Image (cartoon, grey):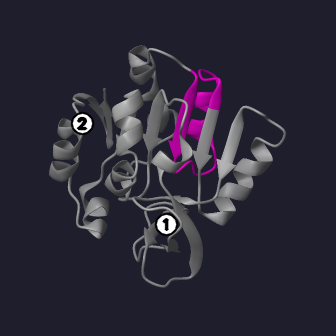
Amino acid sequence: MKHNTAEDETRILYPALDLCKRRRVAIDGGANVGVFTEKLLAHFEYVLAFEPVPVSRYKMENLFRGNPRVRIDGRALWDKSNQEVFLRNPRKRTTSTSFHVSTESGPVPTISVTIDDEIVSGLDLLKLDLEGAELRALHGAVSVLRKFHPVIIVECVEKQLKRYKDSIKSLEAFMSDLDYRLVQEQGVNRLYA
């Protein structure tokens, strides 16, 4: 089985940058240990990174300590804010930090947040790698998407989306309803503008 390198996973950023009209604010949803966040910081004035997995977030906090251009948030991106959610490790892990969010009681509690609640003055790029909860987070971003129309990078793995009774087809319909079109696919990543 071929493992993706950090460069493989961030390559989708370059065509996304070509589509960004401005490069002020980016969100890294599911930031893991900060590889994508670091790439975003090279191109954007400010990055808001969401990572609810404690061990990954700790590594990010050490990496970006003292950097005023990045904010690391430990809440889980979701379709509703201030809801207690739980991180669950899938039975068959694909990576060492492959957790997904569940509303059923679990080992690692956290609080949910929506993008609509966090962004008020602009968003230029949104990247989501949420182990299947990407469409949930997009539902919590409808106002921001309509108002600022950021470029969007979404990881799409059908098996992971099914955890939330979602699918690539439902993601496509959602994006189309918001006048987004699929610009490029690169591995499991999809680029919308």
Depicted 167 relative to depicted 21: above or below: below
**Magenta highlight on residue 153:** no
Q: Which residues are magenta?
A: 24-46
In the picture, residue 35 is in which quadrant?
A: top right
Q: Position of residue 133 (x, y in %)?
A: 37, 59
- The answer to if 41 sits in the magenta stretch is yes
- Residue farthest bottom in this picture: 105
Of the pair 28 and 77, the residue shown nearer to us: 77
Mark 2 burial class by Cα count in 10 Å: few <14, some 14-19, many 20+: few
Residue 143 visible to an observer of this rendering: yes
Rendering quarter of residue 150: top left
Above/below status of 178 relative to 93: above
Q: Position of residue 132 (x, y in %)?
A: 35, 59
Q: CA distance from mark 1 to mark 2?
A: 28 Å
Query: Which quadrant would residue 71 be assigned to in this image?
Result: top right
Q: Position of residue 55 (x, y in %)?
A: 68, 63
Q: Callout 1: helix, strand or loop?
A: loop
Q: Is residue 45 above or below residue 132?
A: above
Q: Residue 188 location, x and y as percent?
A: 32, 44
Whether residue 150 can be seen here = no
Secondary-structure class at tag 2: loop
Label 1: which residue? 99
Disc 2 marks a residue whose amino acid type is: Leu
Q: Amino acid at mark 1?
A: Phe
Q: Residue at x 41, y 28 (%)?
A: 148
In percent of the image, x 35 and y 57: which residue is there? Answer: 136
Q: Residues within 10 Å of mark 1 (few under 14, many from 20)?
A: many
Q: Nearer the viewer, residue 83 or 41?
A: 83
Q: How many marks?
A: 2
Q: Sequence order check: which comes first, mark 1 or mark 2?
A: 1
Which residue is labeled 2 in the image?
178
At horizontal 43% and vertical 55% (from top left) the residue drawn is 130
